[in-house]
């Protein structure tokens, strides 16, 4: 018998890992759902238990007799291992229930699990998430890119909307994971490029915080610059995500490009940078460690003495939860943040000012070029330009460039609002590669 304490009668099983999925569980509990949890790191489930979730010892038990089972796990093998086998979630799921995978994984993996689920009458939806405001991720400010049967999506859309801010049905199983890789490509490229630009600025005597503010206020701005660079400035490299996940994501992106026969020259160069970082650093290091490659190359450190990013994922683990929020012109919500730099600004020379202007222009150009590559991937998947633009706008891959070109997408003939079409790419931008790489 189901407890009458819960306002929503649907029972949900949630299979996660540590902090992954924690905000979504909190939103489900707040909305009155009965949630059973299995965590591959049981000690990390304390907060969920305190809020009313029930902890189980296996995925099977967490999923028993549930209407919906949600997975949020780091790597493809984690998803497969926790869904299949005698103690896997599928062993406890009744016919007519729905599996929703919010992990970023290999879509071949998802298709195989969906095949096994269909054999026992379970529907499958892949719904990888993208943070719309990284520093405010604790209030589940995420978008979902959903692949799978439209009927199943419509039936469970309320649960998705409860867990996040917005969701998009993008097609069949496989499309959701592919769209997530497309948006991550934009973010990872901006992270590498902005790190390189900051290192070059610091080498030329520009304080890192002044260079950062210049880029945020320019057409070069992006989610990566605005919300992730502060974790470089406080030396934490962002504790919310490990390097192994970013290496995995870029590897899957290149694999997808190969399958779709998409060139992806900048994306492949970015993948090389992450692979290099993965070989150099521990796989459990923080994901922005990739920028340390640039720091070593330029012989600088981006850390600003005494600065702490206003987030618990930075150097200040005890930073309090967010209470004040802003809505940007697009409609995206993010926390109201104050960045306090103990170091005062310095007067910049004309040469330094021109350098920052030049680097802002180069960062803008990189955002433009990688947006083209992202559209190539999306079109290769058969997505419309309008849908590609929507998922980019509501993702961690958004930039000032993509936001400013909203009106050009969805038309049969795309118009480059910046002027003449750029010449074909013959070299990788130096903000991506520390050396000039010619394209064959």
Image (cartoon, helix red, strand yellow):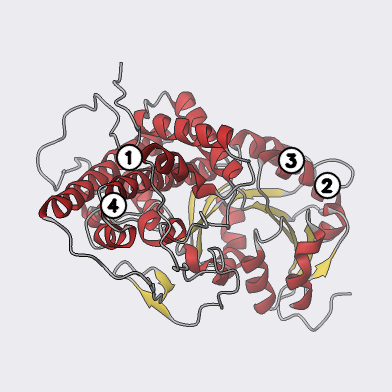
- Among the two numbered marks 2 and 4 on one chain, the one whose residue lies closer to the N terminus: 2
Q: Distance between the residues labelled 3 and 2?
A: 9 Å
- Say which residue label 1 marks: 370
Residue closest to the far top: 440
Q: Residue drawn 37% across and 36% down?
A: 379
Which mark is nearer the camera, 2 or 4? 4
Q: How many marks?
A: 4
Rendered location of residue 398, percent (x, y): 36, 54
Rendered location of residue 210, percent (x, y): 28, 62
Q: Residue drawn 41% across and 48% down?
A: 187
Asked if residue 104 is positioned above or below residue 212 in the image, the reply reads above
277 on left or right of 105: left
Residue 406 bears which disc, if any? none
93 on left or right of 190: right
- Say which residue label 2 marks: 88
Determine crowd level at label 3: few under 14, some 14-19, many 20+ residues with C-alpha closer than 10 A: some
- Among the two numbered marks 3 and 2 on one chain, the one whose residue lies closer to the N terminus: 3
- Among the two numbered marks 3 and 1 on one chain, the one whose residue lies closer to the N terminus: 3
Q: Distance between the residues labelled 2 and 1?
A: 39 Å
- Among the two numbered marks 3 and 4 on one chain, the one whose residue lies closer to the N terminus: 3
Which mark is nearer the camera, 3 or 1? 1
Residue 402 bears which disc, if any? 4
Determine crowd level at label 4: few under 14, some 14-19, many 20+ residues with C-alpha closer than 10 A: some
Q: Distance between the residues labelled 3 and 4?
A: 35 Å
Secondary element type, mark 1: helix
- Say which residue label 3 marks: 80
Asked if residue 131 is positioned above or below residue 283 in the image, the reply reads below
Q: Distance between the residues labelled 1 and 4?
A: 10 Å
Disc 2 to disc 1: CB gap under 8 Å: no
């Amino acid at each position: 018998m189901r407890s009458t304490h819960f306002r929503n009668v649907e029972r949900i099983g949630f299979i996660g890992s540590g902090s992954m999925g924690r905000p979504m569980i909190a939103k489900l509990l707040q909305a009155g759902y009965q949630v059973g949890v299995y965590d591959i790191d049981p000690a990390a489930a304390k907060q969920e238990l305190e809020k009313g979730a029930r902890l189980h010892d296996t995925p099977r038990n967490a999923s028993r007799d549930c209407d919906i089972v949600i997975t949020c796990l780091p790597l493809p093998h984690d998803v497969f291992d926790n869904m299949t086998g005698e103690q896997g979630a599928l062993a406890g799921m009744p016919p007519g229930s729905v599996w929703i995978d919010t992990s970023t994984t290999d879509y071949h993996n998802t298709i195989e699990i969906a095949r096994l689920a269909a054999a026992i009458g379970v529907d499958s939806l892949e719904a990888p998430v993208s943070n719309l405001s990284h520093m405010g991720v604790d209030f589940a400010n995420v978008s979902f890119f959903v692949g799978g049967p439209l009927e199943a999506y419509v039936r469970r859309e309320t649960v998705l909307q409860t867990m996040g801010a917005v969701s998009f049905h993008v097609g069949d199983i496989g499309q959701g994971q592919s769209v997530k890789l497309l948006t991550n490509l934009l973010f990872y490229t901006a992270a590498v490029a902005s790190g390189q630009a900051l290192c070059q600025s610091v080498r030329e005597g520009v304080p890192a915080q002044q260079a950062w503010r210049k880029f945020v206020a320019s057409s070069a701005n992006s989610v990566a610059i605005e919300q992730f660079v502060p974790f470089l400035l406080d030396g934490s490299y962002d504790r919310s995500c490990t390097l192994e996940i970013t290496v995995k994501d870029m590897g899957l992106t290149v694999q997808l490009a190969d399958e779709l026969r998409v060139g992806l020259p900048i994306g492949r160069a970015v993948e090389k940078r992450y692979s290099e970082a993965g070989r150099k650093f521990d796989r459990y290091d923080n994901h922005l460690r990739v920028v340390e490659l640039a720091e070593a190359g330029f012989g600088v450190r981006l850390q600003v003495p005494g600065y702490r990013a206003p987030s618990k994922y930075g150097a200040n683990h005890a930073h309090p939860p967010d209470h004040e929020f802003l809505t940007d012109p697009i409609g995206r919500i993010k926390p109201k943040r104050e960045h306090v730099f103990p170091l005062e600004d310095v007067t910049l020379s004309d040469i330094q000012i021109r350098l920052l202007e030049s680097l802002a222009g180069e960062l803008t150009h990189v955002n433009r070029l990688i947006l083209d590559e992202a559209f190539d991937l999306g079109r290769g998947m058969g997505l419309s330009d309008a849908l590609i633009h929507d998922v980019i706008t509501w993702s961690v891959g958004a930039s000032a460039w993509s936001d400013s070109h909203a009106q050009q997408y969805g038309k049969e003939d795309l118009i480059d609002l910046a002027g003449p079409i750029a010449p074909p790419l013959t070299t990788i931008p130096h903000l991506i590669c520390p050396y000039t790489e010619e394209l064959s």
